[in-house]
Image (cartoon, grey):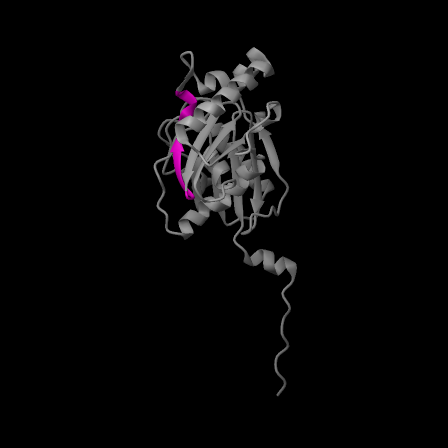
């Protein structure tokens, strides 16, 4: 009796056997999403919808549902949020709308998208997609606000530097946020960034500093050799690493 013929797996079969992750980046000016395979390679186009004014939980979840339809299919969801997040629950959202304090975004997205969901701070996601995993690595994001996270040998510890005193009684966000860039101009903004880099190096003695976010395009100063600009793509690729923490049995941290 002849042996049964082997069935050759096609590229589409291979893709369908992978776990696909819907990666969402919630920002003060735009909400972005795309679906990634297990290696972090995009399998859909990157879609973006502007963040509405007074972005309440209801409005943001509705936009994410619309983006999810454009990025289907997927088996799990990761989302980066611009505020303090603890176990998927939002505690601050300074650059969005009202109604976020105590809102369980992870549970809401899990219900609306019918998929397991992890939510953490957007700078943490950016960092997960950027760091090498050795030494002290600091990540800051420059967008509508200022995000921050530090990694020690790959273990992340969320920071809230944005509202920490920085220059003459003003905070990092006062001097490096989008409002400061618009109001005071690129020359002063770059001068403040140069000062901030020096302060952060003295404060954390980092091995590497990564700077992400939409306003990195306005950076004109020469950066030290241990400072690197990273693209917004890392902010989505970090969604895969967020799930990798679960696979390594790392418990959700207080972010």
- Above-or-below relation of 101 to 114: above
Position of 161 relative to 75 (above/below): above
Residue at x-position 39% and y-position 34% = 158
Residue 96, visible in the rendered structure: no
Q: In this rendering, would 214 be left or right of 242?
A: right
Q: Residue 26, image x and y in percent?
A: 51, 32
Magenta residue check for 161: yes
User: Does the magenta segment cover residue 230?
Assistant: no
- Where does the image place residue 153, in percent across and percent down from the top left? 41, 44
Residue visible at 60% across and 41% down in the picture: 70
Q: Where, by quadrant of the figure, is residue 4 drawn?
A: bottom right
Q: What percent of the width, then of the height, locates residue 209?
A: 49, 33
Q: Nearer the viewer, residue 68 or 84?
A: 84
Judging depth in this view, the residue of 136 and 149 nearest the camera is 136
Would you say residue 109 is visible in this rendering? yes
Question: Considering the image in quadrants, where does the C terminus appear?
Answer: top left
Q: Position of residue 107 (x, y in %)?
A: 40, 39
121 vs 36, left or right, is left
Tell me: residue 82, above or below residue 181.
below
Magenta-tinted stretch: 153-164
Q: Nearer the viewer, residue 71 or 220?
A: 220
Vertical side of 224 occupied by 19: above or below: below
Residue drawn at the location 42% of the way across and 52% of the way down = 247
Q: Quadrant of the N terminus?
A: bottom right
């Amino acid at each position: 009796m002849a042996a049964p013929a082997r069935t050759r797996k096609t590229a589409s079969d291979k893709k369908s056997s992978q776990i696909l992750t819907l990666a969402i980046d919630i920002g003060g000016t735009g909400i972005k999403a795309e679906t990634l395979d297990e290696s972090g390679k995009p399998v859909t186009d990157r879609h973006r919808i502007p963040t509405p004014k007074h972005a309440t939980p209801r409005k943001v979840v509705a936009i994410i549902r619309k983006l999810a339809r454009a990025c289907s299919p997927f088996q799990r969801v990761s989302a980066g949020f611009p505020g303090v997040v603890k176990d998927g629950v939002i505690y601050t959202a300074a650059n969005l709308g009202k109604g976020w304090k105590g809102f369980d975004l992870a549970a809401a997205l899990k219900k609306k998208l019918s998929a397991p969901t992890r939510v953490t701070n957007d700078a943490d996601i950016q960092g997960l997609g950027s760091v090498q995993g050795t030494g002290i690595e600091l990540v800051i994001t420059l967008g509508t606000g200022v995000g921050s996270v530090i990694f020690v040998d790959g273990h992340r510890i969320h920071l809230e530097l944005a509202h920490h005193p920085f220059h003459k009684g003003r905070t990092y966000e006062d001097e490096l946020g989008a409002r400061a860039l618009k109001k005071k101009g690129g020359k002063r903004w770059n001068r403040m960034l140069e000062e901030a880099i020096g302060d952060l190096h003295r404060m954390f003695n980092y091995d590497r500093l990564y700077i992400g976010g939409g306003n990195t395009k306005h950076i004109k100063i020469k950066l030290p050799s241990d400072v690197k600009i990273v693209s917004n793509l890392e902010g989505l690729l970090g969604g895969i690493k967020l799930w990798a923490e679960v696979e390594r049995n790392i418990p959700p941290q207080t972010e």
